[in-house]
Amino acid sequence: MRASDRTTILVIDDDVELTEMLEELLEPEGFTIETCADGDSGFKRALQGNYVLVILDVMLPRLNGFEALRRLRAGSSVPVLMLTARGDAIDRVVGLQTGADDYLPKPFDPQELVARVKAILRRTAPNALRSEESGDVLALADVVLDSRARVVRRGGCIVDLTSAEFDLLRTFLRSAGRVLGREELFREVLDRQFSPFDRSIDNHVSSLRKKLGPQAGGSDRIRAVRNAGYVYPMPEAHAQD
């Protein structure tokens, strides 16, 4: 492994001006930037390298960003920040459901991109120390979450989650039975301030629901509470203890 791999970001985008701008933004922050201009070559390079992050555009030649991400996720858990077109909300939903850790619509504020990159890397750093985390294992009914190994099992089977989905589930398990507002979830999970126009948390919740499935009795594992937020209900057996 090259020494630079520990801080190397792969940018998969065919916009030359944008990739040059990303180099100017991120290299002063201590990152090495590698670029690839099409989806097919991009996901293959991402699989072969040891990147700390992949920045992936949706609109790419040869292979679009969604398909590149799907193929990448089949063999890698590298964090992915997806770039989407402004106003294409469906792109953001599909991107998160396919396995992106976060998305940023174009055009974006340069400093917002830097902040998103740093937030993702804080969440995914292997030696990151988080509050209340000391190798704890959280278990509730058929779901077991190992904070140190960053592994989730449902019914004994591993559930593949993105970094944001993992942190979202951990937050829910720690507060099972309590309604969590979107503002709190943005702060705890995405490490940024809440925006009423940003549906990231809702999209992550939707994806997490699908991956975990319903409770044993068929009820929703994560419930929306109107005008309040979300709650991970305590299973009946635990609620009666």
Image (cartoon, grey):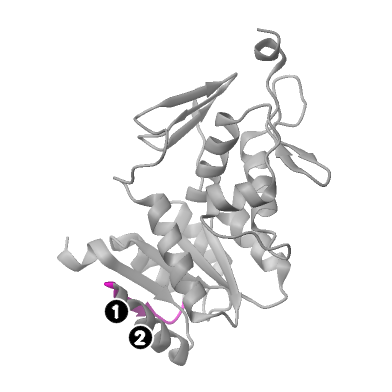
- Estimate the x, y position of residue 152 in percent, counting from the top left: 48, 33
- Judging by the rendered image, the residue that carries numbered circle 2 is 24
Q: In this view, does 224 lie to the left or right of 65?
A: right
Determine the residue located farthest toward the bottom in the rendered image: 17
Q: Mark 1 near mark 2, Cβ–Cβ under 8 Å?
A: yes
State the extent of the magenta-drawn residues as a range: 30-38
Q: Quadrant of the N terminus?
A: bottom left
Q: Which residue is drawn at 67% across and 33% down?
A: 213
Q: Which of 128 and 105 is in front in this view?
A: 128
Q: Is mark 2 on a helix, strand or loop?
A: helix
For the view shown, which residue lies furthest in the right direction?
226
Q: Position of residue 220 (x, y in %)?
A: 75, 31
Q: Residues within 10 Å of mark 2 (few under 14, many from 20)?
A: few
Given residues 98 and 139, the one toward you in this image is 139
Q: Left or right: 109 with respect to 132?
A: right
Can residue 145 be seen? yes
Find disc 1 in the rendering and name its residue: 28
Q: How far apart are marks 1 and 2 (CA)?
A: 7 Å
The x and y percentages for residue 122 are 39, 54
Q: Is residue 139 left or right of residue 239?
A: left
Mark 1, other Cα within 10 Å: few <14 / some 14–19 / many ≥20: few
Describe residue 44's horizontal placement relative to residue 161 as left or right: left
Vertical relation: 2 (above or below) 78: below
Please say whether residue 76 is visible from this viewpoint: no
The C terminus - image quarter: top right
Say which quarter of the image contains residue 90: bottom right
Residue 217, position as x, y percentages in the image: 75, 19
Residue displayed at 46% across by 51% down: 74
Q: Does the magenta stretch include residue 215?
A: no
Q: Hey, what amino acid is under mark 2?
A: Glu
